């Protein structure tokens, strides 16, 4: 079984990927829907550098992150990258109801939200509520940037699909700087910066 180089606490008995499978199975879709057997879990997984996932994480996760994505394999890939980037992935939802339940339970610092979900183009609605009610920083995931409202619903920006490990790592670092230090760094490649961040208020609060 894959083991991360990080302390085990709370839900850390779940290795990267297992949390996603549990969340998705709990949300009614059978595993065969994605054409992948449970044997896929437990295999040795390596990152883009050929190292085991988690091998570069030597400190406690400093961001609680949730994923809102209705494609299980894509969500699993994203969770692996986030865990290897020092994030605590608290849950994954496939639709608006699931997203709100996880957000209320775990109060994430950051959310990666697909725009088009099982219940329609509800990503912007989820983002707007998380930003307004919990101050969560949001990053959209989408293959169609035209589906994002002009104001980005308070999100920091959007990552174009298909994404890669380097882009997600850079976006995590961008979001970490914003969340922990309230400053805006250089926008990573393949990351569409929200227009409101180019002329932010003094406290750079999402709006």
Image: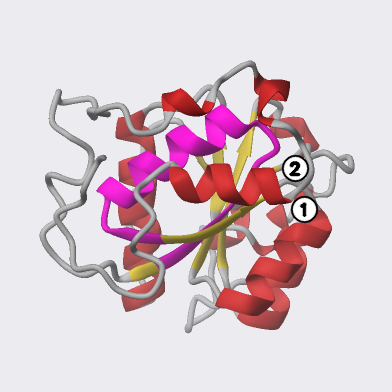
Stretch of the chain drawn in magenta: 64-88
Left or right: 189 as drawn, with respect to 30 = left
Left or right: 90 as drawn, with respect to 23 = left
Q: Residue at x 38, y 75 (%)?
A: 10
Image quarter of the C terminus: bottom right
Q: Which residue is mark 2?
A: 148
Q: Foreground residue, 83 or 200? A: 83
Residue 139 is a magenta residue: no
Q: CA distance from mark 1 to mark 2?
A: 7 Å
- Look at discs 1 and 2 and give the one toward the viewer: 1
Q: Is residue 116 above or below residue 106?
A: above
Q: Determine the image quadrant of residue 126.
A: bottom right
Q: Is residue 121 above or below residue 110?
A: above
Circle 1 packing at 10 Å, graded few (<14), some (14-19), many (20+), is many
Whole-percent x and y of residue 94?
Answer: 73, 46
Q: Residue at x 23, y 25 (%)?
A: 48
Q: Foreground residue, 137 or 50? A: 50
Q: Determine the image quadrant of residue 13.
A: bottom left
Left or right: 1 as drawn, with respect to 135 = left
Q: Which residue is mark 1?
A: 124
Residue 142 seen in the current view: yes
Q: Residue at x 76, y 70 (%)?
A: 129
**Mark nearer the N terminus (1 vs 2):** 1
Whole-percent x and y of residue 2?
Answer: 25, 41
Whole-percent x and y of residue 61?
Answer: 28, 67
The answer to whether the residue labelled 1 contacts the one labelled 2, judged by CB atoms less than 8 Å apart, is yes
Residue 74 is a magenta residue: yes
Q: Is residue 67 above or below residue 44?
A: below
């Amino acid at each position: 079984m894959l083991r991360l180089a990080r302390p085990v606490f709370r839900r850390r008995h779940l290795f990267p990927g297992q949390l996603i499978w549990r969340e998705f199975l709990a949300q009614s879709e059978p595993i065969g829907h994605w054409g992948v057997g449970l044997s896929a879990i437990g295999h040795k997984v390596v990152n883009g550098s050929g190292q085991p996932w988690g091998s570069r994480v030597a400190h406690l996760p400093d961001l609680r992150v949730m994923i809102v994505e209705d494609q299980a394999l894509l969500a699993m890939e994203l969770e692996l990258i986030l865990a290897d980037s020092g994030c605590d992935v608290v849950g994954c939802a496939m639709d608006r109801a699931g997203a709100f339940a996880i957000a209320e339970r775990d109060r994430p610092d950051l959310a990666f939200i697909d725009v088009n979900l099982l219940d329609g183009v509800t990503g912007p609605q989820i983002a707007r509520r998380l930003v307004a009610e919990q101050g969560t920083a949001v990053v959209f995931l989408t293959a169609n940037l035209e589906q994002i409202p002009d104001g980005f619903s308070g999100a920091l920006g959007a990552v174009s699909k298909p994404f890669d490990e380097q882009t997600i790592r850079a976006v995590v670092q961008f979001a970490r700087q914003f969340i922990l230090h309230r400053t805006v760094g250089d926008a990573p490649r393949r990351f569409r910066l929200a227009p409101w961040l180019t002329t932010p208020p003094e406290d750079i609060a999402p709006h």
